[in-house]
Image (cartoon, rainbow, N blue to C red):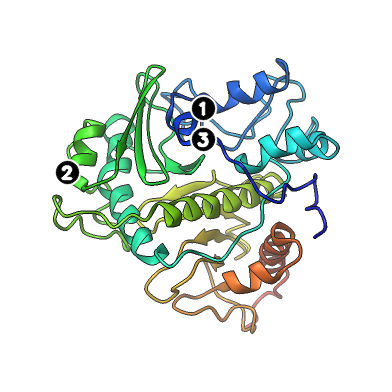
Amino acid sequence: MPAAPGGPRPDVVSPMSAPDRESARNPRAEAEARLGGVAARVLEPSPPAVPAGPWAADDPVDPEGAAAPVSPVPGPGPTWAALARDDPALAAWCAPRWLAAWPRLTPPPPGLAATRLALHRLAVTVVSPARWAETGRIGLRWTLGGFGTPFFGDDVQVRVVGARLVVQRAGRARAHDITTLAAAAAAAGVEPGLAVQDQAGAPPPGDLGAPLAVDPAAADWLGGWFGFACSVLEELRAGAPDGGATRVQLWPEHFDLAVELGDQMAGARASVGASPGDEVHPEPYLYVAPWGEVPDDPQFAARGFRGAELTLAALRAAPDQRGRALDFFRAALARLADRPEETE
């Protein structure tokens, strides 16, 4: 099997052990320590908390504060992919963090659908409300092994790591088995609620004391899916020509990772993202959902919504999965931008 673009891909990716993933973490500091103190950017949120601004969160790929940091995306400095190309040890470190030597997506475990639904409820009812109570914002991010909040307040982060809930506060972390929504809310120190209850797609909390069907293998696979999506969408955002891209966030109401790109006045703006599956799609898929009129084009014939989609099966069949995803997104966005003006 040929190596993935950007570095030698290990045959078996060895992510951080569960205790290490569940301990208190500062992903940017970990990366800079790995490079001997060189300034670096990573995909995961890092402390300190950002209390103000439109996003109230750090930008994982912003070069501000460093002339040329090592970055997951092309920019003024070197990329992780370039550094890892001839360094197998660094490639193995980068792979589970989706910085370089990107692992291939494997077939989803049988328990993915039930796990997705359980974690969707957890995101909406506990994880997002923890951030909402402090910042009035609901957006989540990919984190190693799953998803979670950006840091807020006293450097607090609530995140899902596989089948465990980790609550980190002021440099200390505690991990809890995911059992029920009530137990998760107690562990996070929040009232279970629906910060996004008025948003379409948000599932009701249901019985807060009922067991959550979270399969560890499926939860780990889902964390990999969101990591893959984050790495692709951040590269897409970095190359957006109009400067109007939003941040890449995991929206709890739909439980998908997405970014908004394109010129709205020209009818070329769209939501671009990666869904773990929904009522219409039993498996994960990538999508481009235009804000305006959808082109009369076979490319824009998605099931269940007005837009374009790329199935997991098509993505997994590609020799270069990240390249296939980027090509899909760029082709759909180019089609929106190149449409001729409507005439009366």
Work out whether residue 9 can be spotted.
yes
**In the picture provided, is 77 more to the left or to the right than 140?**
right
Q: Are marks 3 and 1 in contact (CB under 8 Å)?
A: no
* Inter-mark Cα distance, 2 to 3: 27 Å
Element marked by disc 3:
loop
* Inter-mark Cα distance, 1 to 2: 27 Å
Near mark 2 (Cα within 10 A), the count class, few <14, some 14-19 or many ≥20, is many
Q: Which residue is mark 3?
A: 17
Near mark 3 (Cα within 10 A), the count class, few <14, some 14-19 or many ≥20, is few
Write the residue at 66% across / 49% down: 12
Work out whether residue 193 can be spotted.
no
Which amino acid is tagged 1?
Ser
> In what quadrant of the picture does the N terminus appear?
bottom right
Near mark 1 (Cα within 10 A), the count class, few <14, some 14-19 or many ≥20, is many
Q: Are marks 1 and 2 in contact (CB under 8 Å)?
A: no
Q: Are marks 2 and 3 in contact (CB under 8 Å)?
A: no
Which quadrant of the structure image shows residue 27? top right
Q: Nearer the viewer, mark 2 or mark 3?
A: 3
Q: Is residue 117 above or below residue 223?
A: below
Q: Is residue 33 above or below residue 22?
A: above
Q: Nearer the viewer, mark 3 or mark 1?
A: 3
Element marked by disc 1:
loop
Q: Position of residue 252 (x, y in %)?
A: 37, 51
**In the picture provided, is 8 more to the left or to the right than 180?**
right
Q: Position of residue 249 (x, y in %)?
A: 49, 46
Which amino acid is tagged 3?
Ser
Task: Return the disc, 3 or 1, that comes first in the chain's sequence.
Answer: 3
Q: Which residue is mark 1?
A: 46
Q: Which residue is mark 2?
A: 182
